[in-house]
Structure formats: structure tokens, C-alpha cells
Image: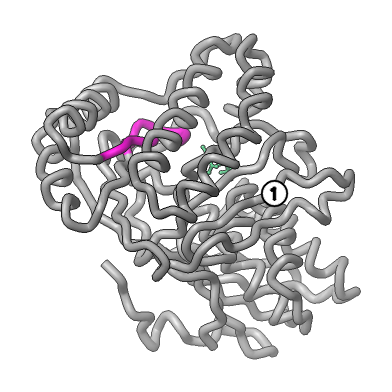
Amino acid sequence: MVREPSQRDRRQPAGMAAPATTARANVNLALVKYWGKRDGALNLPATGSISLTLDGLSVEASVAFGGGEADRVEIDGAEAAGDEVLRVVRFLDLVRAETGRRERALVATRSTVPRGVGLASSAAAFAALALAASRAAGLALDPPALSALARRGSGSAARSIFGGFVEWRRGERADGRDSVAEPLAPPEFWDVRVVVAVTSSAPKAVSSRAGMERAATSPFYPAWVAGAEADLARARAAIRARDLEALGLLAEHSALKMHAVGMAARPPLLYWRGATVDCLDRVWKLRAEGTPAFATIDAGPQVKVLCSPDDASRVAEALRAVPGVERVLTCAPGGGAEVMA
Ligand code: PMV
């Protein structure tokens, strides 16, 4: 699944004066979920979260400043338009504001995340973009500052700056400077697998931003926020101890609580489909049969299962047999964002 960048991917965007800077970042999977904001404009989370960065599912972003009347954005070789461009332009504005630069930029992103697999490539995209755009603009940001910048593009992107197990701290400051991610353990610390069961490749109906706004109307939302610190402490301890059962049960609990909040929101929010429930059921059966496997679900219908490398093929086979599962992929822990050229 890991794809080496080709010469073509590394090419300098056409028509730009300055050389392009290219960076790559991997997606991450939240084990303790981020679901709710204390500040929507700055993407400050209501709670902390903990994730695992995944190998081989990455986005490469090239940025060149200088030349052109307007920012241009190319996604997987095609000129982007509308909201996607707006989101990138707003992000570039942050970098321009930081450096006092005014030049427009050409941004080209290329993703190895299969489209519609429900592994949000926006986290990888904004982490890669934060690194590439800041370097291209002449800024040498340290990892916490990069994480804070990536967060502005997409909250979960704050975590994709780092590899392995990562915690994004809620932070207390109103300006968000302390709401940054930090590494808990590198990818090689603990070799686990995440098996992803894709139950639908349709685009999601409710974005995570809209979903979080809706979640705040739920009577269960205060309980969700109140339980976060205890979940984070348990997850940290489980990672430190490499305790798969403790971490897996906790991750499953965090995901089910997040979705329960949505179900009780007004209007209700349910990302699941029939096959999502059937996958959950299959994971619980696997466990009853003696295979330690634990499910988590994000803002979509896919089921992601944490297990040991030895059990990954058994888990993948079991999920592939669930009616409605379109494809299954398996990921190992991955590294942090890096500059390519
Ligand atoms: O970073 P966003 O705005 O795409 O939100 C991510 C939300 C979840 O994926 C559901 C949870 C998480 O912590 O990644």
C-alpha cells in the first residue's frame, strides 16, 4: 500500500517562480475521539484526544509561493474548485499573515488514501500542507507550532504531524497556543494493526464540523466531555503498558459514546449503516471466540479494528465475509510528517 512518490509527483508546479516545497503526512485514527469544539474558528477541542498514525495512507502536498493572481489548488492532478479551494486559501492566509508575505501560491496535493474509504485524508492533507507551506514561506516552525498550524486546517491534522501514538491536548488558552499534539510513543514502540472494513464509499452526508455542532445539542454531550480526562488517562496507561485489551476496550467505549451522543442530538445524527452494525457484531463474536479485536468508528459508516499483527489476517477475513463490506485494508503504525523535497 505504501507508494513511493514518482518523479511526476515531485515535479515543480508549472508556471511558478519559486521552487516548490513538498511534504508528506499520514492519516491518523483516533482511539480516544475528538468530538466537539470549545472554539469553532480556531478548531480548539472541547476535550483532548489520542490517536495512532497509520502507515501507507498519506497525502503529499507541494507548495510554491510567487507568481499568479490567485491561489491555485490541484488535487490528485485536477484543478480544485469551490469549498476545497476556499479551505486551502484560508489556510495559506494564516501562513501569509505569519510571514507578512502576500504572494499567491500553487498548491498540489496527491493522496495514497483510496477515495471514500472513510479514513479522513483531510488530517494528512493539512498536516502535509502545514509543513510544506510554512517551509515554502521561509518559516522554520518547531513541531508544536506546526501542530497548532495544522489544527487550523482540520482539528485532527494536529495529530498527523507526529508518528505512532499521539495525544492532542485540549489546552486552556483562548488563543489555542497550548492546544497542540505531542508524541506519546513512536511507531516502533508497539506493533499493532488496524483493519479497516469499508461498508460504503459514498461521500459522508454530515461533515465532522457539522456533526460536532449537532452533538452539542445532545443531552449526553456534557457527560461525553466530563468523561474525557479519565479516558485519556486510561489510554495513556494502556499504551505505556502495551496492553491491547485495555486500549482496545477503551477505544471501543470512546467511539460508542461518541455515536451515542449523536443519536440523542437534535436532529439525530447516525453515521452507521446496517453493515456497520454487522461488523461491530462480528468483532464482538471474534472476541467471544478468543481473538482480541476492538472496533472504532469515526464520522462515517466504516469500522476500524485494532488487533495484533498475528490476528490481522483472521480479522480481515472475518470482516470481508460480512455482507455489505466492500473492501478491507490493513495498516501498521506510521511515522510523522516529513519534508520530501
Ligand atoms: O478533524 P476533523 O474535523 O475531521 O474531525 C475528526 C473527527 C473524528 O475523526 C470523528 C474523531 C477524531 O478524533 O479524529
The one of 316 and 82 positioned closer to us in this rendering: 316
The one of 224 and 266 positioned closer to us in this rendering: 224
Tell me: 327 left or right of 68: left
Query: Secondary structure of the magenta portion, mostly?
Result: loop
Ligand 1 - quadrant of the structure image: top right
Quadrant including the N terminus? bottom left
Residue 110 shows in the view = no
Give the residue drawn at x 54%, y 88%: 341
How many numbered dots are placed on residues in this image? 1
Q: Is residue 305 above or below residue 241?
A: above
- Mark 1 Cα within 10 Å, few/some/many (few <14, many 20+)? many
Give the residue drawn at x 64%, y 18%: 223
Secondary-structure class at tag 1: loop
Tell me: 175 left or right of 71: right
Across and down, in percent, residue 325 comes to 18, 35
Residue that badge 1 annotates: 169
Give the residue drawn at x 58%, y 56%: 159
Which residue range is magenta in the image? 293-303
Q: Is residue 300 magenta?
A: yes
Q: Is residue 289 magenta?
A: no
Across and down, in percent, residue 133 comes to 68, 73
> Does the closest atom of ligand 1 sit within 8 Å of the Cβ of label 1?
no
